[in-house]
Image: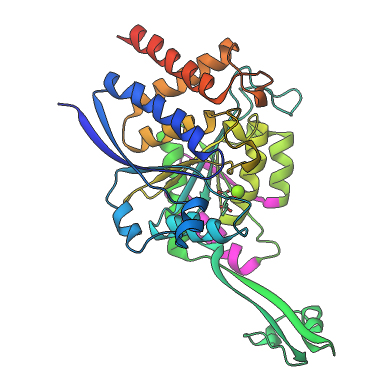
Amino acid sequence: MGKEYNIAVIPGDGVGPEIVTEALKVLETIAPMASITFRWTHYPFGAEHYLKTKEILPPGIIHELGGFDAILLGAIGDPRVKPGVLEGGMLLNLRFGLDQYINLRPVKLYPNVPTPLRDKGPGDINFYVIRENTEDFYIGIGDRVRGAAGSARLPVDRSNYRAAFNVAFESDVAGDYAYQIGLISRAGAERVIRYGFQLAQRKGLDRVTSVDKANVLSDIYGLWREVFQDVSSEYQSISYEFNYVDAMTMWLVKNPEQFQVVITPNMFGDIITDLGAMIQGGLGLAPGGNINPNGVSMFEPIHGSAPKYKGQGIINPLATILSGQLLLEDLGEDTWADLLERAVVSVLEEGIVRTRDLGGSASTSEMGNAVVNALRRLGEAQG
Ligand code: IPM
Ligand code: MG
């Protein structure tokens, strides 16, 4: 008797539906080999749905999605909708609502994939980024304040803050300022940092890197460091280092081989994973998972909806297909996750089917089909 998984599918906007189609094709190829039955439930959320119904997500949806085994998401964002509306109203609400506090983004350069880093090859670029996914500057506390001269007031006691900072509020010009609050909790930092150390252990890695800016934002990232240090003491066989985020961007370009597991607060993680995607050969190859180890996790490519390529069938679906690998791993189907990855590697190694981003002219579905064929080949060889 095979296993059954209920998966929610949110294709979303732009190229989302095209790439999700390919990922589903690939997962459906694995299903019979693995004696798995996938039950897909499609949801129409995204720009089209929002423009038609004025609703981003229906009430009760978090609870409903919480009943699935996993979620597969394409991409969201559309030029007809103001930036931030869907990003915050949908993507961030899902991540926060389902308490997906880990954003797992492997940065792995596969064979035969061009990287802009001269002299670096697949052996040099292979690490996990674990981005905290529910705190930091993403918590949504902030405001823009306008007022008559001298009337604008920060909702905090300014006496604690630097003099230069006060100039903005005491000048004669009408007050006009904005603030955004970043927050890190001990519990919130601890759970994601611990996940990072555990991942290192599970994958047989022995080095973990923390990213912060504790030299300037010393309250918020001071706490982050303190927690990191505390958690690290439980993992004596894993060494660790602290890196400031600015230096981190430099090392990622200069010496990416020094990283195995990188654990980072939310916003720095957002930034360095785009950099990570570039060094692994582009956004077309960068998968991601929003993970709640005790709940339902959501898998998505880290790229956006690329509206200008919508419907052209030229986008590389590998980022979404590889998100399917992370999804299988999350379900505990490691053997099949590995097989999926090996199929992708064999297509890349062969180098015959290459999408435009890889210098070829294959279509989105030709790439999906190539992975399907490779899976069948490898599956047969495996018996
Ligand atoms: C990402 C994206 C999102 C983020 C946006 C779309 C809200 O950039 O997944 O990296 O900032 O987390
Ligand atoms: Mg981002």
In this rendering, position of residue 236 left or right of residue 164: left
- Residue pictured at 56% horizontal, 58% vertical: 225
Q: Quadrant of residue 361?
A: top right
- Residue pictured at 76% horizontal, 79% vertical: 162
137 up-or-down from 23: above or below: below
Q: Is residue 1 visible?
A: yes
Q: Position of residue 211 (x, y in %)?
A: 61, 51
Looking at the rendering, in which quadrant would you find the N terminus? Answer: top left
- In the orientation shown, which residue stands out farthest toward the right? 172
- Residue pictured at 63% horizontal, 71% vertical: 180
Q: Is residue 229 visible?
A: no
In this rendering, position of residue 279 left or right of residue 333: right
Looking at the rendering, in which quadrant would you find the C terminus? Answer: top left
Q: Nearer the viewer, residue 137 or 53?
A: 53
Magenta extent: 218-245
Q: Position of residue 65 (x, y in %)?
A: 33, 52
165 up-or-down from 195: above or below: below
- In the orientation shown, which residue stands out farthest toward the front? 52
Q: Position of residue 148 (x, y in %)?
A: 76, 91
Q: Is residue 232 magenta?
A: yes
